[in-house]
Each structure stands twice: as structure tokens, then as C-alpha cells.
Amino acid sequence: MSDDGAEEMSPALLREARRAAAALRGAESVLVVTHIDADGITSGAIAAAACRRLGKRCEVDFEKKITEETVAMINASEADVVWVCDLGSAYMSMFTREGIIVTDHHVPDPAWRSGQTFLDGYDSSYQMNPHLFGVSGAYEVCGAGMTYILAKAIDPANVDLAYLAVVGAVGDFQDARESRLVSWNRIILRDAVGNGDVAVSRGVRWYGRESRPLLQFLQYGDEPKVPGITDDREGCAELLYSYGVEQRGPDGGWRTWSDLPEGDRVALAGALASRLGDPADIGRLIGEVYSIERYEPGSGLHDSKEFATTLNSCGRYDDAATGLKICEGDLSALAAAERNRTEHRRSISAALAHVRSNHLLRKRRYVQYFDAGSEVRETVVGIVAGMVLNSEDADPGMPVIAFADAEDGVKVSVRAPKALVDRGLDLSDVMKEASKRVGGLGGGHSVAAGATIPPDRKGVFLDEVEDLVRTALNP
């Protein structure tokens, strides 16, 4: 595996990791609070394993997002240490207890460093966030990666948890920017490969290499869209026929992409690439893929994208505990996870169809948005927003804002094209400021962020977002 793009980790980060590790060694009980997506579930699994290997009493609590109730629960916890994973950085100044550790990659709360008034100095609070060390949390390292860095500081033997951080990074699309994991993610990948847990190869990066029949793999491929192939069943069949590739194997079962001989995969990948005129699109189509070697091909956990999707489907359907069991090696949980994954696929398909068939997408001057109300689960509305942004229904030059009803208000998810981010748009800042102006909470990444706002403030919120987007793009 090439280490191009891997750089050394910040000495300041490693010092913070050693401080946090010492706090964990001195604790008797730890509460791990983590997010419900693949990155969060792998983060929680890494943290729990590291604590239990130290002989600590450890409980894991999954949260969809940080709310005022979550903050109150964390501050009131009787655990010696509360370890918040893949969450928390944006709310750091709201934590008033001693013994708190945050391993996160979302944009941090600027008030924590500049305006912290609780605790004596920083002796009892620890924040490991790449943004504090000049590294992007959007693509250079994920929440599970930051959690793994701390786990390794606790004990170098925890290198056997690195593969979970790779799954978390892939689940968070951190390999999408350069069609490979880079920077601190790559250092962690190197650990996973060195431990024999991950294998790196090059190929078509679409989802479903091991789970989808060949025709579906081609027809429903992710970005980039290939003319005459994407959403074209007949075109896919003709391509396979022209290269003499049989869709069924000797046993009569449907073959997958991974079932094909290497020569067939290379030939078909070349045919797909030849239909793409833009070299950048070819770079998005073909790149690195990561296999989890401790699981058998076709198990649903051997391909890193499929592993991450399994975890995401658990978390999005209020069953993150099943995802945690899988990360802990309990394969009996796979049956429940498959039910979650089936429901996840159906729900996303139905949600996208609902938005399209009801023509919910509306366009303003600087943003476009849709309000799904109670018809789309708040836990998947961000995925749907991303799919809408990449569809022919949307203006590719505008952010997409999505609303969905939630128990504590209205969940907002926003996605932006990379071109706008390159021009200076930071959705994390936009969500944080716009939600604050209407009495809500928000944050996230530059290209993908979210918020929770009061139900009666959507119109005002859109006005505020549009004003912030306009200002960012026209400084």
C-alpha cells in the first residue's frame, strides 16, 4: 500500500491523547456517548473495547444528536469519565462537569478555547478534534479515527481496532474526495493493513461489489453516472454480453462484481471509463477499495462500504446496539442487521420517490429546499438531501436544504456541491449561525451539516441561511 498523502500526526494531538489516556486509566467507570451512524457506531465500539480492556466499567449510550437534554445527561452522569465520540465538539463549552473526553471531527465550538470559564484550566477536560490541529475533519480523519488515536495511546495493542476506524471513515465518505483515504486516515489505514485486518486494491468504487448482482451493480452505480449504463438496464445487459460475461455462475446463482475474474473486472472497468469524458469522473469511478480481511467475502462485512452500510442501517432504525454487537464480532446480530438494511433501502427509495412525485423541491435565489414533514424519517433525510442534490431534479450549483419533523422540533439537513465549498461556503458555519438566530442548534462539516430548529421558524431560518450563503459566496 502506498503511503502517498500520509503525514505524521501532530505532536500536540499525541500529547492530548496521552493526557486523555491517563485520565481513562485513573477512572473506575466510563460512559461512552456516541452517534448512531457508521462512524459513530465504530467510534463507540473502539472506545468501549479500549475501556473494557483496561478493566473499566463501561456503558455505551447512542444519541442521534446533541440536545440540551443530552448535555444535561452528560453533565449529571455519575461515571468518573464521559467519553463523547463523533459528537460534542460543537457544544464543548456547554459541558460543565469534570472528566469529559471528546473525540470528534466536526467543527468545534470556538468558545471552548477562547471563553472557557469552568474547570481549573484544562486539567479535567480533553478534546481531540482535527480542526484544532490544522487538519480537516471532512476528509482527513473521522470520528472513529480520532477515537482510535486515543485507543492506541491507551495501549498500542489496540491496533487491532484500526479496521473499525477505516470502516467509519468509508461510512463517512472520507475516501470520496480523492478516491482513497488520505492524511491521518491513511496512517490509520496503514495500521489496519499492517495488522492484517484490511486489504487495499484498485477498482470500480461503486457500492455493492459483493452484495449486488452484476446487472444491479452497474445499473445502480453511485457517482459518477455513466452514460448508457447508469439507470439503463438494457445498456448494462448489452455491455456484459459484448464482453462475454455471464450473469449467472455455474451454480445458477447471480454473480457479483467480486465473483468475476480479475481480467473481466479490468476490461469492464475500462469500458465504463471510456464512456466518461472527464478525467475527474474517471478518477471518481476507479480508485481504492478496502476489504476487511477478518470476514469472508459475501458475508456483508468483507467489503468496507457494505460493512458501513450495515451499521448505518442499524443506527438509522433505532438499533445502533445491533451495529455495536457486529463491531464486537457477534455475527449472530447479522440477521437483525439485514432486516434493518432491507428497511433502510426501502425507506430511502420511498423517501426519494415522495420528494420527486410530489415535486417538493423549491428553488430560491441562493438555495433550494424541500420539506418532507413526517413522511421522511429524520435519521435518513440527510441521505435523501444528498441524493436529491446529485439528481437531475436539482440545480447543481446550489445547496439543498431538507426539513423533516422530529420529536424535539424540525431536523434540518443541508448538502452543498464541492464547487461552492471551494468558493468559501462552509455549511457548518451557516447551520450554526442560522439555527442560533432562530433559537436552534446546528453544526457539522463544510459540505454537509445539520440543525434542529423550532417548527414555526422554518421560513425565517431559510431567510437567514440564504443571507449567510449569499455573504459567503459574495464576500
Image: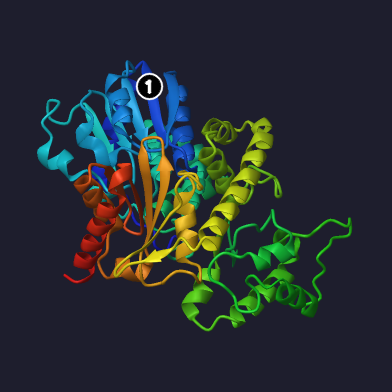
Q: How is the image coloured?
A: rainbow
Return the residue nearer the eye: 191 or 436.
Answer: 436
Residue at x 69% of width, y 55% of height? 210
The residue positioned farthest toward the right in the image shown: 251
Query: In which quadrant is the C terminus drawn?
Result: bottom left
Task: Pinpoint residue 394: horizontal percent, then vertical percent.
Answer: 45, 69
Task: Using residue 90 as the reference point, say whether residue 392 is left or right of it.
Answer: right
- The quadrant where residue 81 appears: top left
Above or below, 475 against 278 in this view is above
Residue 459 versus residue 367: which sits nearer the camera? 459
> On the image, which quarter does residue 267 sit in?
bottom right
Q: Which residue is rendered at x = 44% and y = 60% of the image?
A: 3
Q: Secondary structure at mark 1?
A: strand
Tag 1 residue: 30
Residue for point 48% across, 67% down: 390
Residue 465 appears in the figure: yes
Q: Position of residue 372 (x, y in %)?
A: 46, 51
Q: Is residue 22 left or right of residue 281?
A: left
Q: How many marks on residues?
A: 1
**Do we see residue 291 in this rendering?**
no
Q: Amino acid at mark 1?
A: Val
Callout 1 crowding tier (Cα within 10 Å): few <14, some 14–19, many ≥20 = many
x then y, percent, for residue 177: 42, 64
Seen at 33% across and 65% down, the residue is: 367
Q: Position of residue 388 (x, y in %)?
A: 48, 62
Is residue 36 shown left or right of residue 114? right
